[in-house]
């Protein structure tokens, strides 16, 4: 039962992230903290498999592997959106850079163009 | 020529076969032409320059929307012109139509003049393209609340005032809808003029694929979600 609340809360948080404007520094910090948690949690789960099942039972999931799958799905969704937004931001920046460079290196035929300009 | 206050922006990507003809046809009527070479891998830029256009070259291919915005920036920063014509590099538009539209924009002091191939004549348009465009026009009407009769037509006239207000952020083809939305948002004065689009073998091969409509819709939707915060 508790897992349902957790998963729904996770889905809502995911929705907020999707709508939020990318670029804020919080994303990176969040990504790193999440990454660290996955590493620590992963080692813990390997060393004490029965503990994962205990945690799963505590939140209302039958098996530890099921809980691992749910967590994996949430982490994957978050990572995907976060990367997608990062790429969109990079795309915008590349376009701006390209445009700036293009305007700096504009070439014109000195004879025919711009009568009366400059 | 009476068109000294006009600058024609021609976005071009790998158009070396036709760009020289497009530029020299335009040169017969307009004195100021800038070709935005969107990172072509062929010699589009050199041919355009030789044909008498100014050339702004994207070092990387960024899409037609990005190329047009670069052309608009060039127009605003490097020319004293009052009116900007956008004209596809592939030769599907007619220079006479552009001249007519400029005259209408100047006479009626309009901010935006759009070309409509459905008010006018269309030569050899594939049936699938016609169907898709009809759907796209319906979509644009809903998105902009403007009674448009055509959309994604590369031939337009925009005033300096309009270009100061419009900033295209869609790098690929979705910019066309973005531009229409800007007309309604900034309450720019506008009109549509019947024009002819000639679907040649070349322009059909070079033009958009019908499946690109899905990409356009996706770009518009994702941008709307992001900008709504």
Image: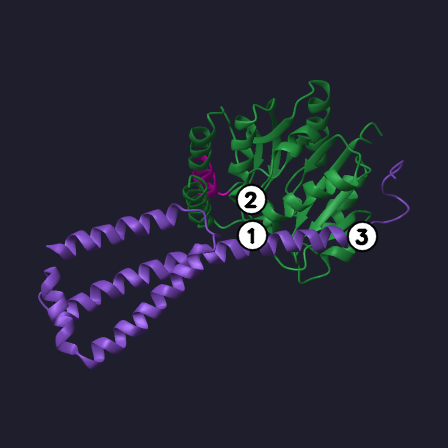
Task: Name the residue beneath numbered marker 3.
Answer: A107
* Percent coordinates x, y for residue B24 in the rendering: 79, 45
Res. B17 in view:
no
Task: Name the residue beneath numbered marker 1.
Answer: A92
Which shade is chain A?
Answer: purple
Whether residues under marks 3 and 1 lie with C-beta atoms below 8 angstroms apart, the answer is no
Helix, strand or loop at label 3? It is loop
Callout 1: chain: A
Helix, strand or loop at label 2? It is loop
* Residue A77 located left or right of residue B18: left
Whether residues under marks 2 and 1 lie with C-beta atoms below 8 angstroms apart, the answer is yes
Callout 2: chain: B
Task: Locate the N terminus of chain B and report the quarter of the image it occupies.
Answer: top right
Are the numbered discs 3 and 1 placed on the same chain, yes or no? Answer: yes
Chain represented in green: B
Callout 3: chain: A
Establish if A70 lies above or below B118. Answer: below
Per the model, the C-alpha gap separating discs 2 and 1 is 8 Å
Residue B134 picture quarter: top left
* Residue B217 located left or right of residue B166: left
Q: Which residue range is magenta in the image?
A: B126-134
Farthest residue to the top: give it. Answer: B108
Q: Is residue B18 magenta?
A: no
Residue A81's mark? none
């Amino acid at each position: 039962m508790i897992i349902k609340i957790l998963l729904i809360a996770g889905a809502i948080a995911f929705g907020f992230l999707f709508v939020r404007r990318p670029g804020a520094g919080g994303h990176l910090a969040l990504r790193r903290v999440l990454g660290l948690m996955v590493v620590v949690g992963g080692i813990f789960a390997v060393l004490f498999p029965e503990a994962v099942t205990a945690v799963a039972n505590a939140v209302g999931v039958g098996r530890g592997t099921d809980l691992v799958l749910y967590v994996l799905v949430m982490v994957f969704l978050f990572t995907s959106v976060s990367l997608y937004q990062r790429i969109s931001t990079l795309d915008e920046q590349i376009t701006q850079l390209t445009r700036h460079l293009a305007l700096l290196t504009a070439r014109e035929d000195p004879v025919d163009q711009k009568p009366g300009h400059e | 020529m009476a068109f000294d206050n006009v600058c024609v922006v021609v976005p071009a990507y790998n158009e070396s076969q036709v760009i020289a003809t497009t530029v020299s046809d335009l040169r017969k009527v307009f004195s100021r032409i800038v070709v935005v070479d969107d990172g072509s891998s062929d010699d589009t830029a050199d041919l355009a320059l030789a044909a008498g256009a100014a050339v702004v070259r994207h070092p990387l291919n960024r899409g037609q929307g990005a190329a047009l915005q670069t052309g608009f920036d060039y127009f605003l920063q490097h020319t004293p012109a009052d009116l900007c014509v956008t004209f596809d590099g592939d030769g599907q538009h007619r220079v006479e139509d552009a001249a007519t539209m400029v005259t209408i924009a100047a006479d009626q002091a309009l901010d935006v003049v759009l070309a409509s191939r459905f008010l006018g004549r269309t030569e050899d348009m594939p049936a699938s393209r016609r169907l898709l465009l009809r759907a796209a026009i319906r979509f644009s009407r809903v998105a902009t609340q403007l009674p448009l009769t055509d959309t994604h037509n590369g031939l337009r006239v925009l005033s300096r005032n309009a270009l100061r207000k419009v900033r295209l952020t869609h790098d690929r083809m979705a910019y066309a809808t973005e531009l229409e939305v800007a007309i309604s948002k900034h309450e720019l004065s506008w009109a549509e003029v019947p024009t002819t689009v000639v679907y040649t073998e070349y322009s059909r091969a070079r033009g958009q694929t019908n499946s690109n409509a899905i990409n356009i819709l996706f770009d518009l939707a994702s941008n709307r979600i992001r900008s709504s915060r």
